[in-house]
Amino acid sequence: MQGRSHLETFRNVIVASSEDWAGVAATHIAARMRLAIEARGVCHLASAGGNTPAAVYRALRADWSRVEIWFGDERCVPPDHPDSNYGMVAESIAGTPTLHRMEGERADRQAAADDYAELLPERLDIALLGMGGDGHTASLFPGQCPTGRVAVVRSPRPPPWRLTLTAEELLRARERIVLVTGSGKADTVRRALCEPGANLPIQVAADDTWILDEAAAAAVRE
């Protein structure tokens, strides 16, 4: 690798080896959770879905009696379905926090979204975000701009219907932490961090903390 690393211009980027990544991410998130608890007595944490964060949740340690976990998005499936984000978090989290489930299986999806919006705290403390190869985050896909706090959206991939926090709601959180791994997302990471005009949903968190493994960081380290 020659020349100056682009990462030096992004003080919000943390890079770890694939072996250490989950532990590094869990340690950073736990520290931010402690600060929220010290400041306000509770940490309202929005979880990221998908496969990437499961290892982080298994490594995460916290005072779970003072943590309330919300969901950044949910597939419209029952909670015991393999695609359920709730199911993944409930199975992976190394503790017993309060879990506020999005009821994605309800026949009236809009009512489920509206009810969840009513339950949300005034501000989330931390929103954990993943990123797809197309730059989507939560269930906010390129070209979609849902409004309100929680929206019903149609996904370009199965399962087709999702409930999601909106960009407006994610921006209301006190901080956002992006978790990305894998070489398949390296170019999208570069675009998100280096091309302000890329118009990717994940750029809602472009100025926040990103925790990457070396493969995901490769295109911004050249």
Image: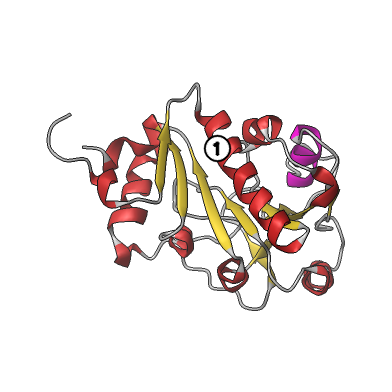
Image position, residue 5 (x, y; %): 22, 40
Does 146 appear above or below 188?
below
**Residue lying at the far front of the rendered structure:** 38
Image position, residue 167 (x, y; %): 56, 69
Specify whether residue 52 is in view.
Answer: no
Secondary structure found at label 1: helix
State the image quarter where residue 63 is shown. top right
The part of the chain drawn in magenta is 85-92
Task: Using residue 24 as the reference point, say whether residue 212 is left or right of it.
Answer: left
Residue at the location (52% across, 69% down)?
Answer: 144
Residue at the location (30% across, 67% down)?
Answer: 197
Residue identified by numbered label 1: 25
Image position, residue 174 (x, y; %): 59, 65
Does 117 appear above or below 210?
below
Q: Is residue 126 magenta?
A: no
**Main SS category, magenta section:** helix
Q: Quadrant of the C terminus?
A: top left
Viewer-closest of 81 and 213: 213
Specify whether residue 105 is in view.
Answer: yes
Q: Amino acid at mark 1?
A: Ala
